[in-house]
Amino acid sequence: MFDIGFSELLVIGVVALIVIGPEKLPKVARTLGHLLGRAQRYVNDVKSDINREIQLEELKRLQAEVTESARSLEDSVRKEYEAARTSVEVPAQAAVAELNEAVQQVTQAAVAPLTEAPTSPVEAVVPATVAPNKPAA
């Protein structure tokens, strides 16, 4: 920080001893030491605050990048989902329509024999292939 060597410190000490005097010099040195300590702490606090702000800015920038990539990924997944849904939905709707037609045809085929009226009460209860039990004479 300051380029002060031992010889410069010795000159400053001798001048301070002459100007301040030997009785007040220890008190002045102690006060000067306290003030320098406070100044160093203040400088260190300012440095740490600046470093914290720099790290905060870096974190904010990183958060913005991560948020942007997450949105991009979400959009990509949504597009793929919609594409897959469309590719499955169209054939599924066609299959459902075919099944509905088949059910309708089967229903119509099953209803058609029921609409024919039976000729005798026995035929209504027992199918034509099965003969009614006749008692032996």
Image (spheres, helix red, strand yellow):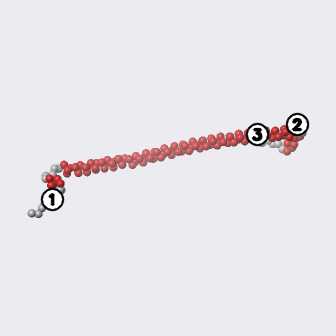
Name the secondary structure under disc 3.
helix
- Position of the N terminus, as image quadrant, is top right
- Position of the C terminus, as image quadrant, is bottom left
Q: Which residue is mark 2?
A: 20
Q: Which residue is mark 1?
A: 132
Are circles 3 and 2 on residues that touch, CB within 8 Å?
no
**Do we see residue 99 in this rendering?**
yes
Q: Earlier in the sequence, mark 1 or mark 3?
A: 3
Q: Residue at x 23, y 49 (%)?
A: 108
The location of residue 66, given as percent across then percent down, is 56, 44
Name the secondary structure under disc 1.
loop
Q: Residues within 10 Å of mark 2 (few under 14, many from 20)?
A: few
Q: Residue at x 48, y 44 (%)?
A: 75
Quarter holding residue 15: top right
Q: Which residue is mark 3?
A: 38
**Do we see residue 16 in this rendering?**
no
- Residue at the left extreme? 137
- Residue type at numbered disc 1: Pro
Closest to the observer: 84 or 43?
43
- Residue type at numbered disc 3: Arg
